[in-house]
Image: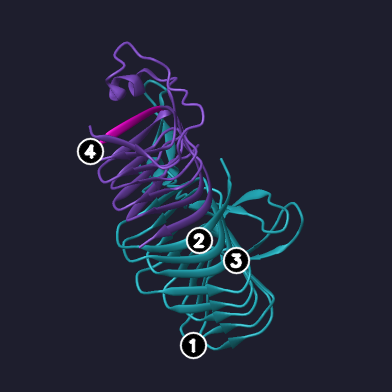
Amino acid sequence: MGIERGGRSPQNPDVQPSENPGNLEAALKEGGLQIWGDVKFRADAVLHGKIRGSVDGTEKIIVSHDASVSGAVRGSDLRVEGEVQGGVTGSGRVWLGPKGKLRVRCRGKSIRIEPGAEFRGELEVG
Amino acid sequence: MESENFISTVCRGCGHYFKSQRAKDSGRRKVRRTVVKKRELTCAECGSVQEVAEEAQSSTCLNCGRHLELGHREISGEHLGNLSLEGELKIGPKGNFGGSRARAARIVLQGRASGYLEAAEWLRVEGHAKLRTGASGGRLEVTVGAVLETGEPIQFQGGEIQGELRCPVARFFGPLRVGPQGVLIAEKVSFTELTVEEGAKVKVQVGESLV
């Protein structure tokens, strides 16, 4: 997984150390991790922890149940099981799981919102 | 020796009583019981449920005394006045329901309606239909190629949009599905679950979660 950090420069980078500090993917999987700033992915990604910024990807992105993103999430196929406050834009399918929380907007080629999911905002398909 | 038409007699030898064959045959009365198929009917006024014959065309509510029209009705021209049917109402392509309220178990809408439509089971839109007011009921079906434009909010238990739906506010208390040829344009929509298939066009503001 390729990761680039950009956008806002963190005032107080609160990236908690993981067992393998050099491997950000492993740190993300542990949960409890917080990232201030925008994150870019060039491959499929599964998000855990808190991201205070936007997530930009070109492939599939899964926002897992213990993840929250304050900004927007962009990718191809998107699966939201956690919380996204800045909306999602997918070039493919967008799936909002039963415990998913989404605000602002939801854009995709096709959309599925499961019962129990919370969504308020603009919905756009096609 | 007994008479030709004897019904019963006693044996002169042993005293046994017996009936003649004719008497036995005539004694078997074949009772034909007609099975009347029944169905449940819910009164639109008070909501009480009663059983009526399946072929009945009208009935009276045992609870509130309301006259219930059970047949079907088709509007092919202008219709003024309210309607309340327990059957199916069809508003044809040139039909216009001009009353203030129409209630039926099932409504097929191909034309126009000025009044409010209430379809207990389902409302199916098959043509280019215009509703000046709103509609409510069990299930909304907008078939492929059909268009429904409403001037006021609509609310249904569920919906399947294969055609085009344009309305200010749409509330679905159950699942909503927009098919690949479906178009949904609304200022505000709410639902418990949503499926939008690839190819559909949707532009709505989702107001609240109804879960």
Residues at circles 1 and 4 in contact by the CB criterion of under 8 Å: no
Question: Mark 3 = which residue?
Answer: B135
**Residue at mark 2 shares a chain with residue at mark 3:** yes
Amino acid under disc 2? Val
- Give residue A30's position: percent from left, percent from top: 36, 17
**Secondary structure beneath disc 3?**
strand
Secondary structure beneath label 4? loop
How far apart are labels 4 and 2 at the CA level? Answer: 31 Å
| Residue A43 - label | 4
Does residue A116 show up magenta in the picture?
Answer: no
Q: Which mark is residue B204?
A: 2
Front disc: 3 or 1: 3
Q: Does A45 appear in magenta? A: yes
Which x, y percent locates residue A55? 38, 41
Residue at image mark 1: B94
Residue B158 shown left or right of residue B70 in the figure: left
- Could you tell me residue B82's position as x and y percent? 68, 75
Look at the image and give the residue range highlighted in magenta.
Answer: A44-48
Query: Label 2 marks which chain's residue?
Result: B
Pointer 3 and pointer 1 on the same chain: yes
